[in-house]
Amino acid sequence: MDDLYKELKNLRSSIDSVDQKIVKLLNERVHYALKISEIKNQIGLPVYDEVREKKVLQLIEKENTRMIPLQVIHSIFSLIIKETRELEEKKKNETKN
C-alpha cells in the first residue's frame, strides 16, 4: 500500500511539472500572438482571422496522439485562441488610447 501512495505522489509531481511547462508555453504563445497583433495593427489587418484559426486547429489535430478525443483538443485550443484574441484586442485598444 505504501508503494501505491509513493507512486501517486510521484505521478502528481510529474503532472505538476507538466503543468508548469504548459503555463510557460502558453505565455510564450501569447508573447508571439501579441507581436503578430502589433504587426497586423500596423498594416491594418483585423485581430480575428478565421482562416488562420481553422489552420491552427487542423495543425493541432495532426499532433494529437488520439489519447485525447479530438473534440476535447478542439475545445481546449478554441479557448486558448479565444482568450489570446481577447488579449490582442485589449492591447490594440490600449494602443489607441
Image (cartoon, rainbow, N blue to C red):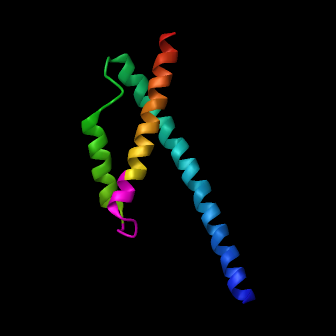
Q: Residue at 24% x, 38% y: name it.
A: 51
Work out which residue is located at the far bottom of the displayed protein and give it.
1
Q: Nearer the viewer, residue 39 or 81?
A: 81
Q: Quadrant of residue 19?
A: bottom right
Q: Quadrant of residue 86?
A: top left
Q: Is residue 36 found left or right of 20 in the rendered image?
A: left
Height in image: 41 above or below 62?
A: above
**Residue at 44% from the left image edge and 25% from the top image edge:** 89
User: x, y (%) of residue 64?
Assistant: 36, 63
Task: Indicate whether residue 71 is drawn in magenta.
Answer: yes
Residue 74 x %, y %: 35, 53
Q: Nearest the camera: 1 or 39? A: 1
Q: Nearer the viewer, residue 72 or 87?
A: 72
Q: Which residue is at a point 36% across and 27% down the rendered structure image?
A: 47
Give percent across and percent down for residue 20: 62, 55
- Image height of 27 relative to 4, above or below: above
Point out the residue furthest to the top here: 97
Q: Residue at x 72, y 90 (%)?
A: 1
The boundaries of the magenta stretch are 65-74
- Identify whether 79 is placed above or below 42: below
Asked whether residue 39 is drawn in magenta, I would say no
